[in-house]
Image (cartoon, rainbow, N blue to C red):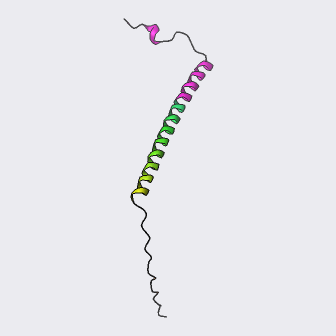
């Protein structure tokens, strides 16, 4: 099968309105795909973060804080 000029080039001219609609449709499709991918990634990371936090809280309870002894304040010589 040989390639012909008609297969690669559209002989009919598109109006500027049609070109704008095609461009708009393509841009909106790309933006929607990116938003969908971003939402999926956010949900995945949120689930991993919650899972990690649950594992950490079960694995090691927080140790009691040690109280610091009150430091003696040295008097300045005047």
Occupied quadrant, residue 63: bottom left
* Rendering coords of residue 58 (x, y %): 42, 56
Residue 21 appears left or right of 8: right
Outermost residue, front direction? 58
34 w.r.t. 74: above or below: above
The prevailing secondary structure element of the residues shown in magenta is helix
50 w.r.t. 71: above or below: above
Occupied quadrant, residue 56: bottom left
* Rendering coords of residue 62 (x, y %): 43, 64
23 w.r.t. 60: above or below: above
Nearest the camera: 65 or 40?
65
Count of numbered labels shown in the rendering: 0
31 w.r.t. 3: above or below: below
Magenta segment: 2-29
Q: Quadrant of the N terminus?
A: top left
> Residue shown at 49%/38% (left/top)?
40
Nearest the camera: 75 or 37?
37
> Residue shown at 45%/9% (left/top)?
7
Nearest the camera: 52 or 33?
52
Q: Is residue 28 magenta?
A: yes
> Residue shown at 48%/12% (left/top)?
9
> Residue shown at 60%/18% (left/top)?
18
């Amino acid at each position: 099968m040989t390639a012909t000029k008609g297969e690669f080039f559209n002989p009919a001219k598109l109006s500027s309105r049609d070109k704008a609609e095609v461009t708009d449709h393509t841009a909106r499709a790309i933006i929607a795909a990116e938003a969908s991918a971003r939402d999926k990634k956010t949900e995945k990371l949120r689930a991993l973060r919650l899972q990690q936090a649950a594992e950490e809280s079960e694995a090691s309870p927080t140790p009691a804080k040690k109280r610091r002894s009150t430091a003696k304040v040295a008097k300045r010589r005047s």
